Amino acid sequence: MSKLYIVPTPIGNLEDITLRAVRILKEVDLILAEDTRTSSHLLRHYEIPTRLVSHHKFNEHKTVERIADQILAGDSIALISDAGTPSISDPGFLLVRTCLDKGVDVECLPGATAFVPALVNSGFPSDRFSFEGFLPPKKGRQKKLKELADETRTMIFYESPYRLVKALEQFAEYFGTDRKVSVSRELTKLFEENFRGSVTEVLEHFKSKTIKGEIVIVVEGKPSEKRTDKEDDEDEV
């Protein structure tokens, strides 16, 4: 049956892909990839001969209607991103919405997403959390940080290695220097690093080294204020 498949790909280690994902990528008529040069390495590794076409944030607005119509005409198409699950801080949302609006069947396979291992590795509460993705690079960044200063849930951010130090400096300014953070870098790769501590400690660690790789920052939520015995008594009344 013609369908749009959302297929997660490894975030680093090529072994982190499901058997089902490999099968689907071999069976579909076409694969849409964020960067065909990056994705071609994965396809060659698993001997996937399916034709690969570029689909990214710069062309998706022009192509989603055509892709949806192509599926309605009988083709099955898979969407992959450079790493992880499409539409999670990657292209995909617009295509999924367009397909659903047109009555196209959409199926998302389970698989790799960078923020999940980073959250678990942090040791911060993971029963409830706020995924913030990339902060605005310029306009709206300070406003967003002010809004998040009182967030009590664990917060998760994606960041580039070039802006990591700046982000930590801003966390110190808006969240406080004692707020606990965990930075995960190069997840699932040979030089994976998970460094935890106060904002000050983590900032000092990364200021002294060359930073490479994809970054996930996990920040503890604002600690709850300790209640006094008087406040507890008032609540009981």
Image: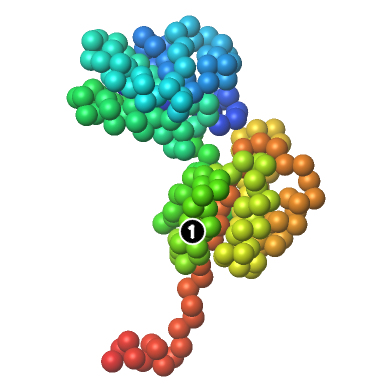
Q: Measuring 53% from the left and 21% from the top, which residue is drawn there?
A: 35
Q: Residues within 10 Å of mark 1 (few under 14, many from 20)?
A: few
Percent from the top left, x then y, of residue 80? 45, 24
Percent from the top left, x then y, of residue 34? 49, 23
Percent from the top left, x then y, of residue 5? 35, 23
Report the front residue among 56 and 107: 56
Mark 1 lies on residue: 143
Say if residue 2 shows up in the picture. Answer: no
Percent from the top left, x then y, of residue 205? 75, 53
Secondary structure of residue under mark 1: helix
The N terminus, quarter of image: top left
Report the front residue among 162 and 213: 162
107 to 116, vertically: above or below:
above
- Three-letter code for the amino acid on which mark 1 is drawn: Lys
Report the front residue among 221 and 20: 221
Q: Quadrant of residue 95?
A: top left
Q: Quadrant of residue 38?
A: top right
Residue that extends furthest to the front in the rendered view of this protein: 139
Residue that extends furthest to the left in the rendered view of this protein: 103
Q: Measuring 44% from the left and 55% from the top, which residue is drawn there?
A: 129
